[in-house]
Amino acid sequence: MRIALVAVGRMKDGPERGLVSRYLDRAAATGKPLGLTGFAVTELTESRASSANARKAEEARALLAGIPEKSVLIALDERGKSLSSEDFAGKIVSWRDMGRADLMLVIGGADGLDAEIRQRADLTLSFSPMTWPHQIVRIMAAEQLYRATTILAGHPYHRGD
């Protein structure tokens, strides 16, 4: 299963980009023997439409255009469901075992995600009911992907109860 982060907006070079890269590189190394590959980031340009609803709709069209049709789509949104790291890892391996070829974690732009993305999503996931800067959400998503691979591999990085 190929895994990718798809985000609206470009992340500047700096320590945040370095952390995302480091976690995704680690996830790729740990995930390869598990049949989990890719761990790429795709950045889409933010819409310049005049209203928040128009921006979200335009960004949704761009996001959906770049996502393979039968992909597992996880929408990262503060209104989503909270999962433990173990449950998140379990969902990933379940989708992999069902033969799903691609898993896309989607991060919206400054206005959030359009309802169309949340409706298409296999899972709407929340890291918290709080609103987080998108660069921090990317770091958190990358770290949780790495953590998921370590849980599935039995690696000591994840030391849950």
Image (spheres, rainbow, N blue to C red):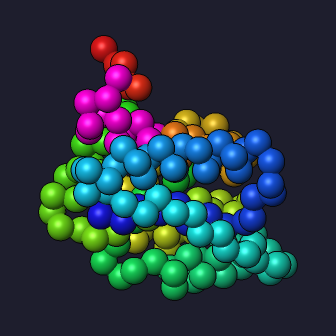
**Quadrant position of residue 11:** bottom right
Q: Position of residue 40 (x, y in %)?
A: 52, 63
- Position of residue 132 in the picture relative to residue 13 (left or right): left
Q: Position of residue 160 (x, y in %)?
A: 34, 19
Question: Residue 152 magenta-drawn?
Answer: yes
98 or 29, nearer to the observer:
29
Name the residue located 34 percent from the left edge and 49 percent from the top edge. Answer: 31
Looking at the image, can residue 48 be seen? yes
**Quadrant position of residue 90:** top left
* Quadrant of the rendering where the N terminus is positioned: bottom left
* Quadrant of the rendering where the C terminus is positioned: top left
92 or 111, nearer to the observer:
92
Name the residue located 59 percent from the left edge and 69 percent from the top edge. Answer: 42
- Position of residue 78 in the picture relative to residue 118 (left or right): right
- Position of residue 126 in the picture relative to residue 44 (left or right): left
- Position of residue 118 in the picture relative to residue 58 (left or right): left
Name the residue located 75 percent from the left edge and 72 percent from the top edge. Answer: 46
- The residue furthest left is 98
**Quadrant position of residue 36:** bottom left
71 or 59, nearer to the observer:
71
Q: Position of residue 9 (x, y in %)?
A: 73, 66
Question: Residue 126 magenta-drawn?
Answer: no
Vertical side of 71 occupied by 131: above or below: above
Total marks placed: 0
Name the residue located 36 percent from the left edge and 82 percent from the top edge. Answer: 69
Q: Main secondary structure of the magenta part?
A: helix
The stretch of residues the image draws in magenta is 144-156
Looking at the image, can residue 137 be seen? no
